[in-house]
Amino acid sequence: MIIAVTGRISAGETTLCELLERKGFQRLSLSDILRDMLREQGRPVVRENLRKLGDSLRKKMGKAAIAKLAWEKMKGGGNWVVDSVYTYEEGKFLRDRGAYLVGVVAPIELRYQRSLERGDRYSSIQEFLEDDEKDQELGIDKMVAEADFVVSNDGTIEQLEKKVEAMLKAISSSPSQS
């Protein structure tokens, strides 16, 4: 089983992936693929460089480029959770190969607060929103609108964990998993 996770900045995609890891899923972050490439190139691993490298790969290999690289790592089977699915084409590529697409949503103010708590250096909520909008150009909202599951992450970790349990139960009882 493959679960591909998308959402806006600090919605809680990584937290959802960590919960699935605890349940035995192997985790693969599309952003980690980019981070590894930047390290190999000796370039600083910062959001701007991640975005530029991702754009460059997408220009060369198509908008699903990073998902294609990830697919090579996952095609041996097993349960995988894929983090940092940012382009509509990445989501479609993974879904076409049987992945469930999960959108994680949370209110803007909560996402901004989380980003500050994790150390992001935004000088204002306006700067955060500008960065958030850059990501939207890739199609995150469209993916969330078409997701197999949308998980609202506006409460506690325990509440999110219950939502993940319900999602897994729904997946395991779906006809394609029988």
Image (spheres, grey):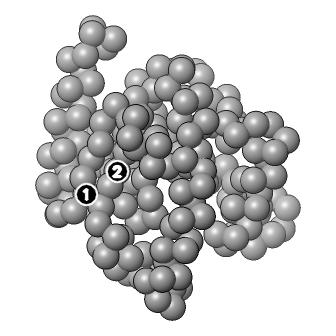
Mark 2: amino acid: Val
| Left or right for 88, reference 63 | left
Disc 1, SS: loop
Quadrant for the C terminus, please: top left
Badge 2: how crowded within 10 Å, few (<14), some, or many (20+)?
A: many
Residue 120 placed where, x, y %?
50, 80
Mark 1: amino acid: Asn
Mark 2, residue position: 104
| Left or right for 147, reference 126 | left
Mark 1, residue position: 153
**Residue 26 seen in this snapshot:** no
Quadrant for the N terminus, please: top left
Q: Which residue appears at 18% of the width and 44% of the height?
A: 163
Task: Please report whichever mark, 1 or 2, sits nearer to the chain's N-terminal start.
Answer: 2
Q: Which residue appears at 46% of the width and 64% of the height?
A: 9
Disc 2, SS: strand
